[in-house]
Image: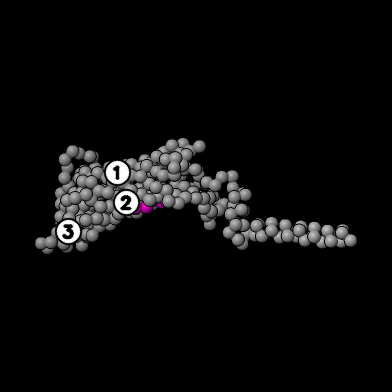
Amino acid sequence: MKLIHIVPLAAAAATSLVGTKARAADPLTAQGIVDEVVSRSESPHAYDWRSATAELEAAVGEVNAANNFDNEVYELAAGIPLGDGSLARFGVRRAQVYAKPSSNMVGRTPFRQASLVTRYEVFGGYGFGLLEGRAMTRLSPWLGDVENALFLWGGAHFSHPNQSLVPKRSDDPTPLPGQAPIHAKIVVETGLRWHVYLPRSFGLAFEALYQHPLGGTDDLKSWTYFSGGVLWSFGAR
């Protein structure tokens, strides 16, 4: 009689265990997806940018200010990943300011618009890692998984007005029609940076910064800066 009761209990227990494993591996649940990805991944990182020696970046950007002048910015920078998941970065920018038909129209009137001038900028900053992780792409398997890193950014730059491409000690740009030249010597920068590391060490970088000058620019209190470029991270273990 005891065997009659033991066998059904054993069968019920086996059924329960099978059901538990099936539920744990259910691909329609978040836990099932995590288990599947982790089980098939050799590393949680598509590229471990934290262990890299340095990064080199080339980018183009634009300043968005409250005036009618156009501009374009070229940037060269180097970054040093820090062990805690943050990034130190420094470099130089060349900002060229141009007149537009609308600013030329302003030049025909007695009014003038405050505008930054053609210049060089030497900058440095620190990025605190907010989010990072491995992501799958819709182009897989042609393009493998990518590594993302989002930084909260803070820094500053020193600005030097320079008309010519070759840096000179004194080379004040000629004012454009309708322009009231503004020279902001020290500017504080805060914003976000997003790095997308494609397979191996090549990547893309995007930046959105709020820039605020320290003193002397009451006519142009602040502006925003947007850039995008390519980067190369090297020396990762």
Say which element carries label 2.
strand
What residue type is disc 2 on? Thr
Q: Quadrant of the N terminus?
A: bottom right
Residue 31 as seen in the image, left or right of residue 21: left
Q: Residues within 10 Å of mark 3 (few under 14, many from 20)?
A: many
Q: Amino acid at mark 1?
A: Phe
What's the residue at 76%, 57% (across, down)?
A: 14
SS of the residue at dot 3?
strand
Sequence-wise, the earlier of marks 2 and 3 is: 3
Mark 1 packing: few (<14 Cα in 10 Å), some, or many (20+)? Answer: many
Residue at horizontal 60 percent and vertical 57 percent from the top? 31
Viewer-nearest of discs 3 and 1: 1
Q: Where 76 sits versus 181, above or below?
A: above
Residue under label 3: 113
Tell me, yes or no, whether the two marked residues, 3 and 1, touch with CB atoms within 8 Å.
Answer: no
- Res 76 seen here: no
Residue under label 1: 123
Question: Residue 224, how many percent across, how many down?
Answer: 29, 55
Magenta part of the chain:
190-195
The residue that mark 2 highlights is 190
SS of the residue under disc 1: strand
Residue 110, quarter of picture: bottom left
